[in-house]
């Protein structure tokens, strides 16, 4: 499997950020890390290996981005407003730096789908819903889509506009809705086993259904826990069946 590591000084975040690239060709799958993890997490936990056949066949090119979760909602020593601002800066980094890097690396605009597990699922879905002109779909696994779950009671506009369960029910802008209603690759998956929260995926599905946004919801059984073996099965399954 072809593998590259890239990095640059991010003006959005004012720090160096790395990104791993796997494969030569195919649509772009942008992987967002879980919790406090880094850009090599999906490789360390063998999820990249689980996608090997798709990558080597040129169906997908994977871009695994770095995280700043420990500089936002997981940093308990940081003022909540500063965490909220840092979260928004991360969005800017993805939209203004990572997406152009993907296009440049692929030789032009390609279908770009975000993916992530756990808190990475929240980020992956939110990135799509906020900029459906830049992102074409998402594969969100085992997520909670209410950012307030992580904010310990703090709430401001940046929390609202990064919490899909808050802003999507109130979304009436036809520009956003027309873009989202045209998507064919919104995938929401969850297990029902230990530490999973399948109702949170059902809640998001209900909001999308009410807005007429096509999507695919799959709730797996009680043997599917909130852990890597589940995600190593889910992601190849979706790539093989929905793309």
Image: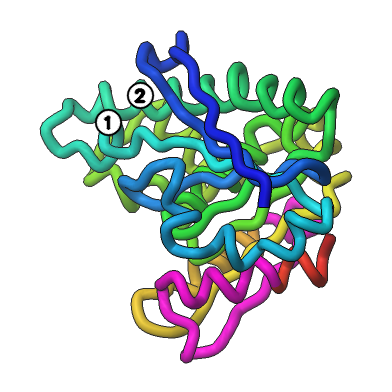
Hey, which residue is sitting farthest left in the picture? 77
Element type at mark 2: helix
Q: Which residues are magenta?
A: 208-236
- Residue 170 visible in rendering: no
Left or right: residue 66 versus residue 185 is left
Q: Is residue 102 above or below residue 142?
A: above
Question: Which quadrant of the structure image shows residue 109?
Answer: top right
Q: Is residue 145 above or below residue 61?
A: below
Q: Residue at x 51, y 37 (%)?
A: 65
In the picture, which quadrant includes the C terminus?
A: bottom right
Q: Is residue 124 above or below residue 202?
A: above
Q: Looking at the image, how many numbered discs can be counted on the residues?
A: 2
Q: Are marks 1 and 2 in contact (CB under 8 Å)?
A: yes
Left or right: residue 15 versus residue 152 is right
Q: Which mark is residue 71?
A: 1
Residue 212 located within the stretch drawn in magenta: yes
Q: Which mark is residue 86?
A: 2
Nearer-the-camera pick, 64 or 96: 64
- The image shows residue 39 at horizontal and vertical percentages of 45, 41
Q: Earlier in the sequence, mark 1 or mark 2?
A: 1
């Amino acid at each position: 499997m072809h593998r590259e590591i890239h990095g640059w000084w991010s003006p959005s975040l004012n720090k160096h950020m790395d990104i791993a690239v796997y494969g030569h060709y195919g649509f772009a799958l942008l992987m967002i890390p879980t919790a406090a993890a880094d850009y090599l997490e999906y490789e360390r936990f063998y999820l990249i290996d689980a996608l090997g056949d798709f990558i080597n066949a040129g169906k997908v090119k994977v871009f695994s981005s770095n995280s700043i979760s420990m500089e936002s909602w997981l940093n308990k020593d940081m003022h909540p407003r500063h965490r909220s601002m840092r979260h928004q800066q991360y969005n800017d980094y993805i939209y203004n730096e990572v997406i152009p890097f993907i296009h440049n690396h692929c030789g032009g605009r390609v279908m770009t789908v975000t993916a992530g597990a756990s808190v990475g699922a929240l980020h992956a879905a939110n990135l799509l819903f906020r900029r459906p002109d830049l992102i074409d779909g998402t594969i969100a696994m085992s997520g909670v889509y209410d950012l307030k779950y992580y904010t310990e009671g703090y709430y401001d506009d940046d929390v609202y506009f990064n919490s899909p369960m808050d802003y999507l029910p109130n979304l009436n802008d036809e520009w956003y809705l027309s873009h989202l209603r045209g998507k064919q690759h919104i995938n929401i998956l969850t297990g029902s086993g230990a530490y999973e929260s399948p109702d949170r995926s059902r809640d998001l599905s209900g909001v999308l259904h009410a807005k007429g946004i096509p999507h695919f919801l799959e709730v797996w059984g009680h043997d599917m826990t909130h852990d890597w073996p589940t995600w190593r099965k889910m992601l190849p399954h979706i790539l093989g069946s929905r793309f």
